[in-house]
């Protein structure tokens, strides 16, 4: 399950925050890179599993994308 979440959650977050498809794909790539870097950094300092921490960061970004949706659209 975590592997599929790593791929689908950034796209779902980006689709919530943007209007067009091209903007969504660029935003999804930025979210994916940010979540991987943040997840690996957090896992290093907190001594947590890297994959699970990346998934947790993805879910947090997805949760934050819903309130942003109201302002963008």
Image (spheres, helix red, strand yellow):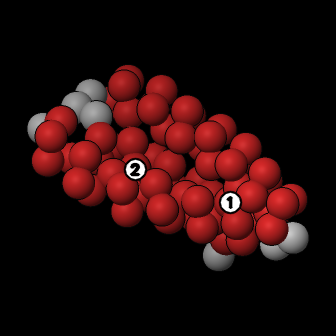
- Mark 2 neighbour density, 10 Å: few (under 14) some (14–19) many (20 or more): many
Instruction: Please give the label number shown on residue 42.
Output: none
User: Residue shown at 49%/38% (left/top)?
Assistant: 28
Question: Image quadrant of residue 15?
Answer: top left
**Foreground pick, 21 / 40:** 40
Left or right of residue 5: residue 45? right
Dot 2: element: helix
Q: Which of the image's four quarters has the N terminus?
A: bottom right
Q: Position of residue 22 (x, y in %)?
A: 38, 24
User: Residue shown at 22%/32% (left/top)?
Assistant: 19
**Foreground pick, 50 / 16:** 50
Instruction: Please give the label number shown on residue 13.
Output: 2
Badges 1 and 2: C-beta atoms under 8 Å apart? Answer: no
Q: Which of the image's four quarters has the C terminus?
A: top left
Q: Position of residue 29 (x, y in %)?
A: 56, 34
Q: Position of residue 5 (x, y in %)?
A: 58, 64
Q: Position of residue 18 (x, y in %)?
A: 28, 34
User: Residue shown at 79%/53% (left/top)?
Assistant: 40
Question: Image quadrant of residue 47?
Answer: bottom right
Left or right of residue 59: residue 44? right
The reply to whether residue 12 is in sight is: no
Residue receiving disc 1 = 54
The CA span between labels 1 and 2 is 14 Å
Q: How many numbered markers are drawn?
A: 2
Q: Earlier in the sequence, mark 1 or mark 2?
A: 2
The reply to whether residue 57 is in sight is: yes
User: Residue shown at 48%/27% (left/top)?
Assistant: 26
Q: Is residue 59 above or below residue 70?
A: below
**Residue reaching furthest to the front:** 45
Q: Is residue 56 above or below residue 23?
A: below
């Amino acid at each position: 399950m975590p592997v599929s979440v790593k791929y689908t959650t950034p796209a779902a977050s980006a689709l919530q925050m943007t209007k067009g498809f091209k903007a969504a794909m660029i935003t999804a790539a930025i979210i994916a890179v940010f979540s991987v870097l943040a997840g690996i950094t957090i896992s290093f300092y907190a001594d947590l599993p890297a994959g699970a921490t990346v998934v947790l960061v993805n879910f947090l970004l997805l949760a934050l994308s819903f309130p942003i949706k109201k302002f963008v659209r």
